[in-house]
Image: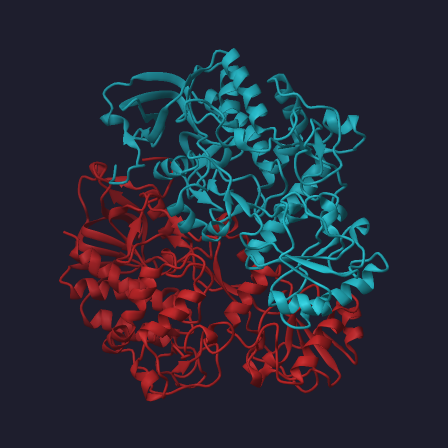
Chain colours: A cyan, B red
Amino acid sequence: MSASDCAPRSARDVARYDLEADVVVVGLGMAGACAALEAQAAGADVLVLERASGGGGTSANSGGLIYLGGGTPVQKACGFEDTPEEMFRFLLAASQPGAREEKIRLFCEGSVEHFHWLEAQGVPFKRSFHPEPGMESPTDDCLVYSGGEDCHPWSALARPAPRGHKPQTEGKAGPYLMQRVLDTVARRGLRVRGDTRVGRLVQDPADGRVVGVVGRSAGEALLVRARRGVVLCAGGFVMNDAMLFRHAPILARCSMRAGTDGDDGRGIRMGQAAGGDVVRMGQGEVALPTTIPNRLSRGIFVNRQGQRFINEDTYYGHIGIESLFRQQGRVYLLLDEATYERGLLGLQATWVAESVAELEAESGLPRGALEATLSFYNRHAAQGEDPLFHKRRERVQPLERPPFALIDSGTHAAIYATFTLGGLETGAAGEVLGPDGVAVPGLYAAGRTAALFCGSGYPGSGSSLADASFFGRRAGRAAAANA
Amino acid sequence: MSASDCAPRSARDVARYDLEADVVVVGLGMAGACAALEAQAAGADVLVLERASGGGGTSANSGGLIYLGGGTPVQKACGFEDTPEEMFRFLLAASQPGAREEKIRLFCEGSVEHFHWLEAQGVPFKRSFHPEPGMESPTDDCLVYSGGEDCHPWSALARPAPRGHKPQTEGKAGPYLMQRVLDTVARRGLRVRGDTRVGRLVQDPADGRVVGVVGRSAGEALLVRARRGVVLCAGGFVMNDAMLFRHAPILARCSMRAGTDGDDGRGIRMGQAAGGDVVRMGQGEVALPTTIPNRLSRGIFVNRQGQRFINEDTYYGHIGIESLFRQQGRVYLLLDEATYERGLLGLQATWVAESVAELEAESGLPRGALEATLSFYNRHAAQGEDPLFHKRRERVQPLERPPFALIDSGTHAAIYATFTLGGLETGAAGEVLGPDGVAVPGLYAAGRTAALFCGSGYPGSGSSLADASFFGRRAGRAAAANA
């Protein structure tokens, strides 16, 4: 259609197809696997094309947490009350502005069913709670507070419940999660073709319907017909420097990108070229895990002006987004002798001094600013209070025992890990929507090829895999049902 | 091509055209007028289609400031030294992250020539300076500091120079500016067709080339062939609620939208449907003019935590973006008896009290927070210093004379005026770029249908008209040169 190398090929120009299926799924990470399984369950003949030799994608490289709630068996077994409505309240609030209310509602109402479905695909969850919030447990324990649900401001808006669910395995669960899901994909006899890179869609010029894909495999072009639909589950664009600079330049400042080579944005660009709209392309998950373990949040974060800017006890993803997008990425954690320890990252104090005034001088913070901040903080902390940011009482204690330490958390000394949250705009069935809100017929997307279900921000660890799996399933079903 | 009502029509399906031109310009605001004039000057037969009965668009509704520099005759006459390099330094810094360096360089290097060109089109500029910064003068004076160039942090990065140029007329200059430009359009005999709404492009399915437009006029379809190219200058999308919610939900909080009915995003959507990419769709100009006149910046802005967050003397557009995007839109201006006055907006103090502690109680700010902030500020202000934000010395004075006043500047009591800055991604010649950076042949865009030349933020008043006129001209020339 144009000089663009992502532009769809016209179906008129395709004389014959090498392969056919009812539903063609592009990419075999979490979203693609779930789409394929559900399309097959709905009676469709499915073909999955994956550019790597095997499935897994970025999901297999993740911590494996999945955000689920509303009263899952794990939540119940661990004594946490949760309802779809409380989960909805949290996610809606944490997703503003621009929350996709319909998607969030579907996601919350379907969450318990989704939990059972995942278990039925061979992904087990231990009925146990891990008290350290924020990220997956190092043990095989399951449930964690992964979005600051029990922290300000969310704790006042919805009854707190932990919703991060980790598959039952020691340590990082992404590889195990994907192994279990891929085993099921294999057991169900799904057709998967690896080492096959999809570069373009095939589109009927008469009505814009997507009817296939153009791939390459072993140096040969491969034309694949999709009788009912194509589901793009090809990852995000965090590994594409040009796209990152164009759409999300602030994310390029992060020291670590969570992705594989596959996250080159090709899926998004193919979808755009076929008429899909993109949204929230500037947004990302941003992890700043300085306060792991969470007792490090007894310290205080300050910005370049020596001012506090967040309740330190909250999810490190909220801290990361706040730091990078609103504090110019220049933030520091102040600790005293009583609260200092080397946390998860093993970070050493950047500056240590016997007085806060010395710390200001060494770090270049404005003279007196940190002292003023600490004086205000300590005065209230002595009474267990944090009137500015309402940190949980158990994390509030005066910082008064020298030496004092300041950890530069905004530069490469710390870790800002990121992946992209923007992508193709999809409806609740995973259908790709055009700029005027009309679906591109035959085209679906899920996982990070699509924009996350949230408006702005990133509500908690496990949201991306939850979105990928839940809406991946819906996309697979919708494509299968598309006559 | 699809069910989308913005999708291009295939040239194969067009049996005959009602009208023809070398270059078809869609929209007759500042960008469209400049594109048309330059395309004609380059030898093209031009046709302008405008949905309103007459030209002007949102440009005619603006203050009329145009950001120009590098040593314009007005700058020189008023004794301000400026060079393209200093202008570039300021714009590059103020445009980070994601500054479009090539465009900014072209813009700075071409700025003096652009000034002369505007005068040659009948837009006069008085050789005079207006000392009140931020917005156009109420008199017919020309030059103003319109981007905080002489304020922190820019003043340390580039030699300050005022660059806001107002056409020579009393008061708001947008209507006059557009009248002069439209007079020239008429005098040059350019073909303009009003009351003609363009809804789709016509695209050659063979190579993706844009070869015309589909319009409606007096209830009849109108097919227009463009032999060389189409330039979309159809405004932004601030008046389209669905698009604003989808792409820029935070801007929907603004109490005033600067636009006309034409800013419905149609131009952007047509361009997308033809293969164009969109960038920075979440961004907007955000004006929070609480500190006009600028001596009101002797007060201090605080956020919900009672903390300062910006040097108050800077451009109210920087303050607006900072307030809305980074301070949740909840900001307050604190004044004392010595600094209080009702400014441009005529805002009255929301709360008045004999002590700051009372103000805190009345406004609901955390107890002691404002007192701590003010104590720190006053201590340094007594020495003419602002160690946190480096406000200009002449605006720094202790706030110590009761009664104290707090103006709620973040709600509907104040004015957040906005327009959108995101749109089609264009190259330096105004060519519309697809998701992989390849131009859509025959398609150009300028004005707010295209993304502003800057990365993030909005560098100063007059940037939008400057971008529209400068890159509008380039788009017109490129389209005319397109064989």
Q: Is residue A199 left or right of residue B316?
A: left
User: Looking at the image, can residue A318 be seen?
Assistant: yes
Count of marks placed on residues: 0
Q: Is residue A347 left or right of residue B432?
A: right
User: From what the image shows, is residue A427 above or below residue B220?
Assistant: above
Q: From the top left corner, tell me how far across and down residue A285 is, in percent.
A: 55, 44
Quadrant assignment, res A366? bottom right
Which sits in the foreground, A411 or B8? A411
Q: Is residue B59 visible?
A: no
Q: Is residue B47 left or right of residue A293?
A: left
Q: Quadrant of residue B364?
A: bottom right
Where does the image place residue B158, in percent across and percent down from the top left?
41, 74
Q: Nearer the viewer, residue B260 or B415?
A: B415
- In percent of width and height, residue A80 lies at 79, 33
Position of residue B106 in the picture relative to residue A72 (left or right): left
Residue at the (35%, 61%) spot, across then down: B101
Q: Residue furthest right?
A: A383
Rendered-image quadrant of the N terminus of chain B: top left
Q: Residue at x 78, y 59 (%)?
A: A399
Q: Position of residue B417 (x, y in %)?
A: 52, 66
For this rendering, which residue is in front, A62 or A96? A62
Above or below, A67 relative to B469 = above
Residue sitting at x 52%, y 19%? A182
